Image (cartoon, grey):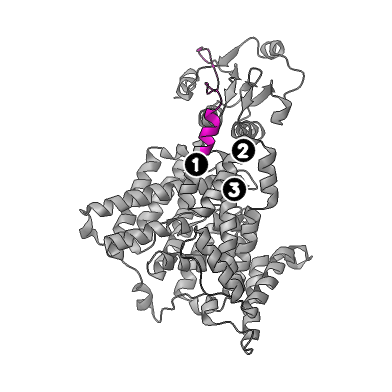
Amino acid sequence: MNKQTSIFSNIKGDLSAGLVVFLIAVPLCLGIALASGAPLFAGMIAGIIGGIVIGFFSGSQLSVSGPAAGLTAVVLTAITKLGAFDIFLLSVVIAGAIQLVFGLIKAGTVANYFPSNVITGMLTAIGIIIIMKQLPYAFGYDKSSDNAYEFIDAEHVLFAAINHISIGATVITCISVLIILYWSKIPKVSIVPAPLVAVIVGIILNKAFSGSAVLALGANHLVSLPVPNSFNDFLGQFTLPRFSAIANKEVWLVAITVAIVASVETLLNVEATDKLDPLKRHTSPNRELKAQGIGNIISGLIGGLPITSVIVRSSANINAGGRTKLATMSHGLLLLVCTALIAPFLNMIPLATLAAVLLVTGYKLCKISIFKEMFKNGKYQWVPFVATVVAIVFTDLLIGIGIGMAVSVLAILRGNMKSSYFFRKEKYQQGDSIRLELAQEVSFLNKASILLTLDHLPANTNVIIDATKTAYIDFDVLQTIREFKEIKAQQKNISVILTGFKEVYNIQNTPNLTADQQVKMTNGHVHTIASGTHNDLLKELQLN
């Protein structure tokens, strides 16, 4: 593992980020368990397993896994349908096994077919939802929408919160937001993470307000974590699945549903996290499915909720300075320690402070600049983007993503769908150049085949990507080509020549190299990649 991604390369930043994510994860784990109709401890188990186990097995350096708000409706319905939580746990175990199989058969590559405008729309919508969901806590209102994605219900709660403002909670929120935004600008002391400072200040303010009838916060405005009185009490909170229900058809139907929903949500969140990664690393979707499968099997075996990669905690991890998986693993260890030993201390933290942390995180996901950027990229980008945002905010995550994908497909089908590139079948010789000639229309549906083609090109070669005959290239494909030239090609010592790209694509052509000069440079050994399938190319390069 290189220095950039070594688990020990950023110990100070990762441990600080792990602490921040841990502080955010505590109320989320509890709240999601409550909304799912499950024991509160089940949410903590899912957070612990998501951090330690999935964090260890995952190929992602920044993704944080745990109980997800997007699964609350599925879990609540399943527990009610099955009649007992321990029967539901058996479904979680089976769902994990199904995810493991998905990873083994390499089903994770389906993530390559999700266009970036839908992923960006998902992130933006989640940012809006985070803000709407946290504003009641920021004002000190002790009720929230049961459905994390129901805009109308959340709107009613928000108006109720405005009419029932707690001055103490509002003051803590405002001060916490200011600390998070401006603490890093203070020299010398900025080494301490701003969210941690906000939490400490929130606890101090809560104690200071306790003597005031106007400013004091009630117990329902603080973190509420179960407090075990003994080690036996702690062990007694774990629940085993009811294996005798293995023949129950409903158990298997629930398991399949959870496996599919959790897998899709994980793949989208992991790809979204990769886009937020300052180091621009790529996570293997198949390895991630295997890690999630192992995590869900263990979580179900000891009484935890189903787990997915979660973008709220992942983005908070990145914003707090996390750079390796040490951050997510340390957050899981902290959840374990606090659940067993220091729950009373954590119960002193005002929910208003945690709301402030999430408000800033939500704002960074849905800034106005994101909307401006999408509109600047043209209608093929902004129409599916807006459709995704609106659909998720007014319905739920999966329905919104489905609508966004449908709009993307309909927009592309208006064009002329053709093969993305062509090749003449000739045996590849070491040292030859490979020419990739893009077709007249290249859409996001071609992204997966082009991505796999570029990823499987041999090291120490010359690659010519020719867009001379191309009338339209999708934004996602352009991003794939940029990433290949600037990052992946350099890692494999591949020389990349770009030619024929229009100025509007914002990709710089390799200067002063005509087609004849390219042929001469490679002694005439130029193989034109032209067929349409990735498997044909693998056979040609003798890499299958």
Residue 381 is left or right of residue 288, and the answer is right
Question: How far apart, in angstroms, are the residues tagged by discs 3 and 1?
Answer: 15 Å
Which part of the image, by quadrant, shows the C terminus? top left
Quadrant of residue 408 in the image? top right
Rendered position, 413 above or below 18: above
The stretch in magenta equals 407-428
Image spot of residue 365 (x, y percent): 62, 53
Which residue occupies 70% across, 10% down? 516
Task: State left or right for residue 409 relative to residue 305.
Answer: right
The residue located at (72%, 14%) in the rendering is 514
Report which residue position mark 3 lands on.
5
The crowd level at tag 3 (other Cα within 10 Å; few <14, some 14-19, many 20+) is some
Q: Nearer the viewer, residue 520 or 380?
A: 380
- As shown in the figure, which amino acid type bears the numbered disc 2? Gln
Compute the Cα span from label 2 to label 3: 32 Å
Q: Decide which of 245, 16 is in the foreground and name it.
A: 245
